[in-house]
Image (cartoon, coloured by chain):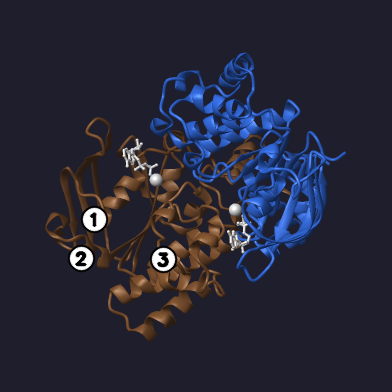
Chain colours: A blue, B brown
Amino acid sequence: MALIEFADFSFKYLGADSLALKRIKLTIDNGEYVVITGPSGCGKTTFCRAINALVPQFHRGYVAGNVYTDGKNTREYEVATFASVAGLVFQNPENQLVTLDVEKEIAFGPENLGVAPSEIRRRVEELIELLDLEELREKHPHEMSGGEQQRVAIAATLALKPKVLVADEPTSNLDPQSAEAILEIIAHLNKRGMAVVLVEHRLDLVAKDASRIILMDKGRIVADGDPREVLAMDLCEEIGVGVPKATQVYKRLKTRGIELGNVPLTGVELAELVQEATSR
Amino acid sequence: MIILEDVHYSYDGVYTALRGISLQVDDGERFAVIGANGAGKTTMVKHMNGLLRPQKGRVILDGRDTKFMSVAEIARKVGLVFQNPDHQLFLDSVKKEVEFGLRNIGFTESEAAQRRQKTLASLGLEGFAERSPFTLSGGERKRVALASVLSTEPRFLALDEPTIGQDAHQKNQLAQMLAEMNKRGRTVVVVTHDIEFVIENFPRTIAMADGQIIADGSTNMVLSNDEVIERCSLAPPQMTLAARALRNVFPEVGQRLTLLSELEETIMGILGGA
Ligand SMILES: Nc1ncnc2c1ncn2[C@@H]1O[C@H](COP(=O)(O)OP(=O)(O)O)[C@@H](O)[C@H]1O
Ligand SMILES: Nc1ncnc2c1ncn2[C@@H]1O[C@H](COP(=O)(O)OP(=O)(O)O)[C@@H](O)[C@H]1O
Ligand SMILES: [Mg+2]
Ligand SMILES: [Mg+2]
């Protein structure tokens, strides 16, 4: 059974005049690291909301087809059922944090689900260690930097032991180094077996971690596959995807008759490919 | 011209968010402000349009101390697009949102409608006029906030992290609009972490850290400084990393900041331009 299955799913928000998602068919399996990208307004956030039933149960509208998350139809089970399967992290952590300190913030979700106190303590300690939150233990979330808040928000989400972390532009308000720190944590979680669905425009930062990239445009999936294959497509430039600079150089060289052999995603990879080409 | 003279500001009386900012902004300039989260960038630009007033030091706009000017008076000259559009948008349609500012500064109904249409189209928002900002995606909302200020085309334009949530096309559209306004003599200040956006569009860069300006000069010079990159919590651009890695093997690769097209030519050179 797939972890997430979109079975010909379409969705139109109440009052909107076009579909936000159009006939989406795909499956996402355990352990995958899927990056979703595409122009703003193409449906990425709606896609994330559909994974954990916020669409169509909280954001209402016209629905066709089904989404199954962990085998359960998101139209049939309560939203709360999905909180412990798909953990959602948003762009603005401040909108997500509710309590007064780090420990309470992490404990909040499992307490609401009635998890035993001893188990909650165990999870809190584990997550404080995993996300390097020791120094923030006594701090109020509103005294923290954006990067610190985002780490707490991720910890709070993980406390529910989700099978997939769904992160919707989690670093777009952060400076590049804080963003990289968050993305490293996400890549690390994926290596420990957690599936990741990440919405991101700055593919320079994430393409190297992804096992798969999905391109969306106007509510549809227009490409889905290996990052190097997807980013090498001309379609990316046509719909305005921020192709990594190194990949752009590769493409330009190709049109001038220089074939580097493989598609680079980072500057260092590009340099390596150039060196290999000279020694051939 | 805007002059900041030794500006100090603290929100809570304990932590000082600005510690002696001095800066001159000439008419018709175009520059970027960079810095880590919490460096004081937003606090500084809020001083430029009078939302915050210095607790020590002065802000002088066209020769007048802003202390003696009303917010409305300053706002007519200096337009600020907030970092978070949720703090800026409050009306129930995109159309009203954009026309509000225009009507406020004296445009007639039909002029306002015309400008609104033109600005929305330039930002890829045609067809959104009747929508409520609260039903838009994050990136769309950000562009509505941009449209409501850009449509008024103030003499000084300050944009706080305008590229958040925007894709490559939308960033280009924005860059083009700013370039056109700059050509018409408007001054453009952009706060951003997007170092490539800076390299491609802004000749001058100001770097901030801990409430102070740590570098101010040509973008090329400021961004070639490793200390600036580190203290502003930036990541070196991929093209710089590529150039560095290439330089280890091909000493002819240059030391300075690298544009994509320059790297392309360098590699063509190395691989014999076949
Ligand atoms: N609550 C809502 N009501 C009506 N339309 C909405 C709502 N939220 C989003 N939309 C519309 O749905 C489309 C997809 O939005 P979204 O999924 O947020 O895009 P993305 O995350 O890719 O920027 C957009 O056209 C947007 O305007
Ligand atoms: N409304 C506020 N109340 C208290 N402190 C604030 C407020 N806004 C910003 N600060 C603090 O002022 C400092 C500078 O913030 P800001 O100007 O927003 O930085 P930047 O825009 O560079 O991220 C930070 O330490 C921040 O926590
Ligand atoms: Mg979104
Ligand atoms: Mg700011």
Which badge, 2 or 1, is on the more N-terminal residue? 1
Q: Secondary structure at mark 1?
A: loop
Task: Please report, as a chain letter, where disc 1 is located.
Answer: B
- Which corner quadrant of the image does residue A14 belong to? bottom right
Q: Residue at (20%, 65%) from the top-left corner?
A: B73
Label 2 vs label 3: CA separation?
Answer: 23 Å
Which residue has dot 3 on it? B91
Q: Nearer the viewer, residue A261 or A169?
A: A169
Ligand 1's image quarter is bottom right
Rendering coords of residue A52 (x, y %): 69, 44
Rendering coords of residue A50 (x, y %): 70, 50
Q: Residue at (51%, 22%) from the top-left corner?
A: A103
Q: Is residue B192 left or right of residue A70?
A: left
Q: Kindly identify the amino acid type of the residue bearing the numbered disc 1.
A: Gly
Which residue has dot 1 on it? B50
Q: Is residue B138 above or below residue B14?
A: below
Contact between marks 2 and 3 (CB within 8 A): the answer is: no
Which residue has dot 2 on it? B73
Rendering coords of residue A167 (x, y %): 63, 41
Labels 3 and 1 share a subunit: yes
Q: Secondary structure at mark 2?
A: helix
Q: Residues within 10 Å of mark 1 (few under 14, many from 20)?
A: many
Residue, far left: B68
Q: Nearer the viewer, mark 2 or mark 3?
A: 3
